[in-house]
Image (spheres, rainbow, N blue to C red):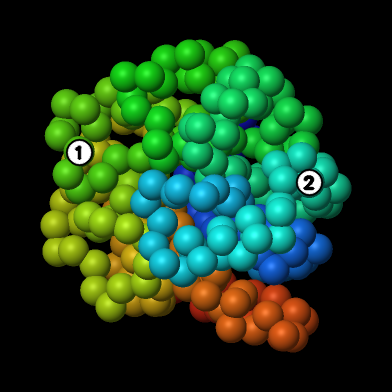
Amino acid sequence: MSAVDDVFTELRRSGRKAFIPFVTAGDPDLDFTAALLEELAARGSALCELGIPYSDPIADGPVIQASYTRALDRRIKLAQIFDMTSKVTPSISCPVVMMVSYAIVYRFGLEAFVERAQFAGISGAIVPDLLVEEADELSRISAAKDFSLIQLVTPTTPRERAVKIAQSSSGFIYFVSVTGITGERAQLPEQLLDNVSWLRGQTDLPVCIGFGISQPEHVAALAPVADGVIVGSAIVRRSAENASDRYAAVRNIGDYATSLMEALSG
């Protein structure tokens, strides 16, 4: 059982859903990232997702891409991110998982990456560019070390393939709500609830929905069928808009997260 498994076991026992905010590591710097993780955990986030800047992200929209570019322009390094999380994670109440490109994991070495991430207090990884056909080794390593390997299912994933992805995943399944890239949207697809309901019938893993979720109305609509919701671009945008006043930025994002969590709990 990983720390992510423990979270969802408790949430299911108590009939609650997971709020999972996304934060870009190092935007505008790692001190801000640490403060934001602390705030989001204190507000009641079930998990926090930490985006590892990468020059060629697979599915991220312009807001998150811009945040990655800003961090990379400041020469943020993975070792620095690990150092930050090793200091922050012992003091916060929720697990942290990384959104990281498989290219980074592969260059680091699969087993070495998992071991280093765990040493730094990371409980799992979302690897958006890892094909299910190539996931066996990382899935095996992760399972042996109780490290969650969270994989993505999209609206266009064939159902047979979606089942295979679920079988090689752990922690939870990240269901992509829309076709395309991340970013805030006014409306979510009509077929989303049916697609998530079907997937939940194929696996015992929790299913959490991300991409395009930014409003309390979205969260309230998804709560009956999802085990959790993931919110990224709306948080990253608020970080950038309030960069000149870090205290205000952290407080503003905390208030925003609270409004979504209230919608999630009904």
Residue pictured at 26% horizontal, 56% vertical? 180
Q: Secondary structure at mark 1?
A: loop
Residue pictured at 70% horizontal, 33% vertical? 117
Q: Which residue is mark 1?
A: 157
Q: From the viewer's perspective, tell me whether residue 136 is left or right of residue 147.
A: left
Q: From the viewer's perspective, tell me whether residue 111 is left or right of residue 200.
A: right
Which residue type carries mark 2?
Gln
Which residue type carries mark 1?
Thr
Residue 116 versus residue 226 in the image, above or below: above
Q: Which residue is mark 2?
A: 80
Q: From the viewer's perspective, tell me whether residue 266 is left or right of residue 175.
A: right
Q: Secondary structure at mark 2?
A: helix
Disc with the residue nearer the chain's start (2 vs 1)? 2
Marks 2/1: CA distance? 35 Å
Q: From the viewer's perspective, tell me whether residue 171 is left or right of residue 175.
A: right
Q: Position of residue 46 (x, y in %)?
A: 59, 53
The number of numbered discs placed on residues in the rendered structure image is: 2
